[in-house]
Amino acid sequence: MAEHNLLGDKGEMLAGRFLLDKGYAVLHYNWRSGHKEIDIIARQRDVLVFVEVKSRRSEEFGNAADAVTPMKIERLITAAQSYITRNRIDLKFRFDIITVVGDCEPYRIEHIEDAFYSTW
């Protein structure tokens, strides 16, 4: 497996643990709809949370959250629509970003709630 994939997998695991520590229920990791993927689907009380995780060794080349491009946002929204429809979900929902920076402890984790909105 490529080194950047290992970093991404580690970041998703750390982000999931971070959410669990904050009282979220993690429902899925790497949920797929065709070629679209949602890194983490969680629930916080009565809100379904779709989480995009961005992991970086450092922020030397910019903020990790900035890597969530408009095209990525569009793909996440489409995948979330598919998840909600397939599972007949009737909950409020939101889109969050979690960034994990560092390649060893202590990692710097930032959780951006309501990072972007869907027009749907």
Image (cartoon, rainbow, N blue to C red):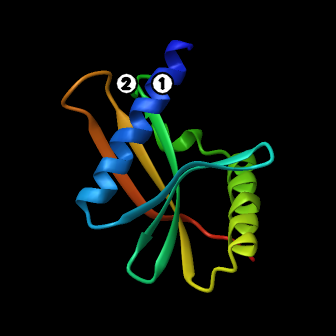
Give the SS element for disc 1. loop
Residue at x-position 37% and y-position 49%:
16
In the rendering, which numbered label is found on residue 61?
1
Residue at x-position 71% and y-position 62%:
77
Does the CB distance between marks 2 and 1 fall below 8 Å?
A: yes
In the rendering, which numbered label is found on residue 46?
none
Q: Where is residue 89 drawn, in percent x and y?
A: 64, 80
Disc 2 target residue? 58
Residue at x-position 41% and y-position 22%:
60
Check the image and report above or below for 115 versus 32. Answer: below
Q: Is residue 72 left or right of residue 58?
A: right
Callout count:
2
Q: Where is residue 90 drawn, in percent x and y?
A: 62, 86
Q: Where is residue 105 drawn, in percent x and y?
A: 20, 27
Looking at this rendering, what residue extends furthest in the left direction?
A: 106
Residue at x-position 68% and y-position 73%:
87
Q: Is residue 89 left or right of residue 7?
A: right
Check the image and report above or below for 116 versus 71. Answer: below
Q: Residues within 10 Å of mark 1 (few under 14, many from 20)?
A: few
- Which quadrant would the N terminus be assigned to in this image? top right
Check the image and report above or below for 101 versus 52. Answer: above
